[in-house]
Image (cartoon, grey):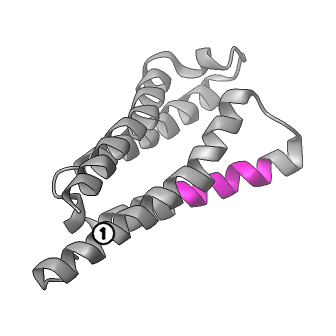
Amino acid sequence: MERERKLLQQTVALAAIIPAATGLYGILFGQALTGDAVSISAESHFRFLSGLLFGIGLCFWSTVPRIEDKTNRFRLLTLIVVIGGLGRLVGLGLTGLPSLFMIGGLVMELIVAPVLCLWQTRIANRHAEEYGVAAP
């Protein structure tokens, strides 16, 4: 079990680099990543959303130590990410196919995050069985 727990910790730590780095880049450089020129208000909104993305990455990193005890936090973060992914999916349906970077984001939001959440739950449940305590 310890080996699988460490692998989950490493996987979450690596996966969280994506929202943290993308969010920080968006905070610092605005929509430069997309190459689109937008209004100052749209730029401000983009930077705000980038701040949220950065925060999500930081919060996922905060689950890495004692990941077996962070079930509630992990589930809440996953819910937030999936809701964002569903919003992106609606946009895909309404406006068409976005760039490959945005498709990659969609995969992270609707596939990778839920799979990691299920894996974290598995580790938490195994920890509870082994030590006789339920992880929060």
Count of numbered tags: 1
The image shows residue 38, relative to residue 81, as above or below, that is above
Looking at the figure, which quarter contains the C terminus?
bottom left
Residue range highlighted in magenta: 80-91
Q: Is residue 79 magenta?
A: no
Q: Compare residues 51 and 122 and report the one nearer the observer.
A: 122
Residue of label 1:
71
Q: Amino acid at mark 1?
A: Thr
In the image, farthest residue toward the bottom: 132
Q: Residues within 10 Å of mark 1 (few under 14, many from 20)?
A: many
Q: Quadrant of the N terminus?
A: bottom left
Residue furthest to the left: 131
Element assignment for label 1: helix
Instruction: Using the image, determine if residue 106 lies above or below residue 25.
Output: below
User: In this rendering, would 84 be left or right of 9?
Assistant: right
Residue 12 placement, left or right of 131? right
Residue sitting nearer the eye, 97 or 15: 15
Front-most of residues 6 and 115: 6
Magenta region, main secondary structure: helix
Q: Residue at x 46, y 21 (%)?
A: 25
Picture quadrant of residue 105: top right
Residue shown at 68%/34% (left/top)? 102
The answer to whether any part of residue 63 appears in the image is: no
